[in-house]
Image: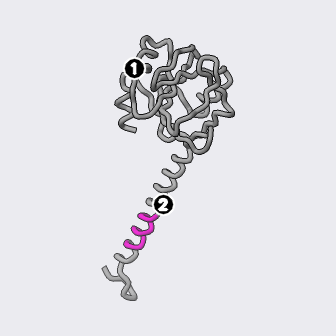
Amino acid sequence: MARKGGKSLFSLSTLLASFFGAAMIAGAFAYFNYKFSEYKFIDFKEWAFYEKSDIFTPKEETYIVVFYSSRTKGSIEKLVKLDLNNPILAIDYYNQISANSKTTTFLRSGTNTSLKFIQRFNIYEVPSIFFIKRIKESLYKQDSMIRKLDNLDELSKEVKKL
């Protein structure tokens, strides 16, 4: 279709399509950048977690954090038997003392720290898992989305997906 002055409608629609395409790409980039920045930090010097009676000091570069309930039948036994590529920090909702295994460190904390942890990571259900990665010394950053599991039997399958 030709318009007056020899300009076609095609060039205007091409220009608009290019503009909207670029806007969509910029929007997607901004959204994913925002979602990544939502990942939270945890500083183990600020928040006291305990292994039995000792304060936990992280040593590894990455951990799988499992927030679970010790009142769920068999949960501790399942966590002890797990042997994944990364060490596990198992944080109990009920703060029960449990013996560590080769790959799983059981943590507990005071009510104030537990509430801060639940609120910071927006944990709404148990068991939930996510990865953390060391940034410096005792400062770790969430390195994956938080996933809710139906039960701890799914843990090894979910870790492979992450």
Quadrant including the C terminus: top left
Residue 63 image offset from top left, x and y in percent: 50, 34
In the image, 1: left or right of 147?
A: left
Instruction: Point out the frontmost of discs 1 and 2.
Output: 1
Distance from the alpha carbon under mark 1 to that under mark 2: 46 Å
Q: Secondary structure at mark 1?
A: helix
Residue 118 image offset from top left, x and y in percent: 59, 28
Quadrant including the N terminus: bottom left
Residue 91, by quadrant, is top right
In the rendered image, which residue does mark 2 sit on? 26
Magenta segment: 14-22
- Label disc, if present, on residue 96 of the rendered structure: none
Closest to the observer, 14 or 161: 161
- Label disc, if present, on residue 81 of the rendered structure: 1
Residue 54, by quadrant, is top right
> In the image, what residue occupies the spot 41% across and 69% down?
18
Query: Is 8 situated above or below 27?
Result: below
Residue 112 image offset from top left, x and y in percent: 68, 24
Query: Is 102 situated above or below 142?
Result: above
